[in-house]
Image (tube, coloured by chain):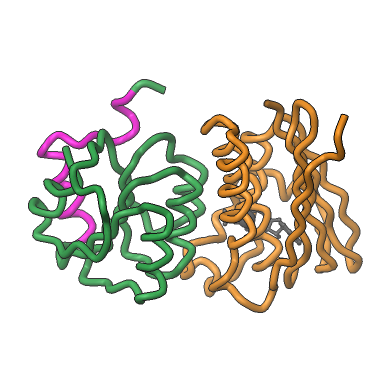
């Protein structure tokens, strides 16, 4: 699935991202960055309802390619800039976490359990 | 051998917004030096966890990262409250973080065990009322 397809499926706004055709294999959803740092392996998309700069830095440390803010959360311009500098695409959707994750999963985006390693 | 390459950072303890900046910078530097992605990832995650800990538990500190022959050494030093029971602190799920920290997305008690998992060596020296020094090594 590409970042552009995620945008369409979630009816999301793209706040930054210069590689919308980037291929994504798997995703994770969490409001706890502690858990993302401890449990996530190679998921390239983070869905979250938490909004602070640590979300961007956590995604960057984990080599993620895209962050989706759910529940109409809007990151600040400074946060979007931080993501841009790191080559991370930022999407915002009005859908709730459960719904957003469900839509992506139903369309073939896997979690970590179903991938090797 | 030539002098080891060292990066030094002051980590501001009063500013959660900027927490993690040193780790982001280290990641950029290691990329520029041409390290493989897995090594960079291990160093980045371990250092970021430690940097966040210094900000939320210890009021800030300093970080020194040295690129040595065969390994990258990360030393995090603070003059915070120290860790009374290091074995306990190393347990998954043990945290003294308050709810305000949890609402920022941290405080699950996963950081120290995660640092251990991503590094080849980790040593914690801590004294209550004096501070904490954490030394980590990632071999490459
Ligand atoms: N630099 C430090 N100074 C003082 N206490 C510390 C320091 N680092 C860790 N601790 C203590 O060790 C506990 C466990 O740390 P750890 O990083 O594993 O979890 P956490 O920071 O509470 O939550 P998480 O890392 O999952 O966000 C902390 O709650 C704190 O009591
Ligand atoms: Mg921690």
Q: Residue at x 50, y 48 (%)?
A: A61
Corner quadrant of residue A85: bottom left
Corner quadrant of residue A74: bottom left
Which quadrant holds the C terminus of chain A? top left
**Chain A palette colour:** green
Q: Residue at x 69, y 73 (%)?
A: B13
Viewer-proximal residue among A93 and B33 = B33
Q: Position of residue A33 (x, y in %)?
A: 47, 55
B136 left or right of B107? right
Q: Please say whether residue A70 is one of the residues in the magenta stretch.
A: no
Q: Position of residue B67 (x, y in %)?
A: 75, 39
Q: Position of residue A36 (x, y in %)?
A: 45, 48
Q: Position of residue B61 (x, y in %)?
A: 77, 66
Q: Please say whether residue A99 is one of the residues in the magenta stretch.
A: yes
Q: Is residue A58 above or below residue B36?
A: below
Q: Which residues are magenta?
A: A96-115
Q: Residue at x 37, y 52 (%)?
A: A87
B108 left or right of B87? left
Quadrant location of ligand 2? bottom right
Q: Is residue A3 above or below residue A111?
A: below
Q: Which chain is orange?
A: B
Viewer-proximal residue among A101 and B27 = B27
B128 left or right of B54? right
| Residue closest to the far top | A116
Which quadrant holds the N terminus of chain A? top left
Q: Residue at x 34, y 33 (%)?
A: A112
């Amino acid at each position: 699935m590409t970042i552009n397809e995620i945008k369409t499926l979630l009816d999301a706004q793209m706040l930054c991202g210069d590689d919308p055709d980037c291929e994504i294999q798997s995703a994770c959803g969490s409001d706890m960055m502690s858990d993302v740092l401890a449990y996530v392996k190679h998921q390239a998309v983070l869905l979250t309802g938490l909004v602070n700069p640590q979300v961007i830095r956590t995604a960057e440390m984990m080599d993620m390619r895209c962050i989706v803010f759910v529940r109409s959360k809007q990151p600040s311009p400074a946060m979007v800039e931080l993501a841009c500098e790191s080559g991370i695409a930022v999407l915002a959707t009005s859908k709730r976490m459960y719904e957003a994750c469900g839509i992506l999963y139903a369309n073939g985006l896997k979690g970590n359990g179903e991938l090797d390693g | 051998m030539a002098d080891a390459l060292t990066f030094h950072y002051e980590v501001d303890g009063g500013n959660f917004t900027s927490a993690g900046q040193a780790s982001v910078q280290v990641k950029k530097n290691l990329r520029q030096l041409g390290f493989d992605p897995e090594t960079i990832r291990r160093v980045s995650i371990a250092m970021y966890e430690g940097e966040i800990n210094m900000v939320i538990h210890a009021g800030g500190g300093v970080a020194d990262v040295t690129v040595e022959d065969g390994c990258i050494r990360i030393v995090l030093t603070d003059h915070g409250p120290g860790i009374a029971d290091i074995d306990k602190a190393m347990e998954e799920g043990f945290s003294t973080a308050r709810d305000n920290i949890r609402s920022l997305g941290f405080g699950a008690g996963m950081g120290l065990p995660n640092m251990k998992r991503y590094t080849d060596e980790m040593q914690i020296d801590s004294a209550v009322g004096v501070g904490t020094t954490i030394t980590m090594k990632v071999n490459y």
